[in-house]
Amino acid sequence: MVRSMKPALMENNVLTVRFIKTILDLMPFPVFIKDEFRNYFLINPMEAALFNLPEAEILGKSDEFFIGSLEELAVIISSDNEVLFHEKTIELPNQTFTIHGHKHVFRTVKQPIVNPFTGKTNVLGYSVDVTDEVQLQKLKKVVTMCSNPFMC
């Protein structure tokens, strides 16, 4: 009886992953799940587009493969570790990524989620691109400064 349950359980796991993937794919911003080793377990198409790579080339890899800046990488690893080892939800209001020479600024939230298959804490993260908002704030500061004749 135990042997006959294993294929059914495996099929249930596959269906569960497909269901979660369907939900992630509906999100209008980059979403990812990283495993306990900080490797990408699931991502949506918006996350893949951020890296300008097919999903299959991202899954199973960590950020070290994609992020060239050691400073940016340190922020990613540190925040992932806070989630994985201290089970804290982390918000990075102005996280900077430079991917393929393009600088992006994101408001990123990472939170702990227990993987039902392994029982281990994983990272569920999502990022909202705030690059234009940050640029607009900088422009407003310049305009404000230049509108004062003593500041320009």
Image (tube, rainbow, N blue to C red):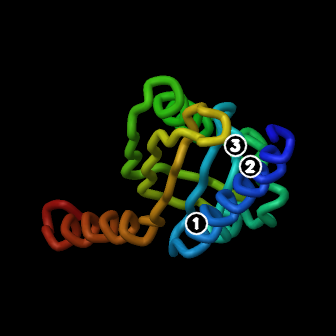
Do we see residue 50 in this rendering? no
Tell which tag, 1 or 3, sits nearer the viewer.
1
Which residue position holds label 2? Answer: 9
What's the residue type where badge 1 is placed?
Leu
Could you say where residue 76 lies in the image, as x and y percent from the top left? 56, 39
Could you say where residue 23 lies in the image, as x and y percent from the top left? 56, 69
Which residue position holds label 3? Answer: 63
Which residue position holds label 1? Answer: 24
**Are there few (<14), some (14-19), or many (20+) residues within 10 Å of tag 2?**
few
Distance between mark 2 and mark 1 Cα atoms = 23 Å
Location of the N terminus by quadrant is top right
Q: Earlier in the sequence, mark 2 or mark 1?
A: 2
Tell which tag, 2 or 3, sits nearer the viewer.
2
Q: Earlier in the sequence, mark 2 or mark 3?
A: 2
Q: Earlier in the sequence, mark 1 or mark 3?
A: 1
Do we see residue 51 in this rendering? yes
What's the residue type where badge 3 is placed?
Asp
Above-or-below relation of 37 to 113: above
Name the secondary structure under disc 3.
helix
Task: Count the labels in the image.
Answer: 3
**Quarter assignment of residue 34:** top right
Q: Nearer the viewer, residue 10 or 84?
A: 10
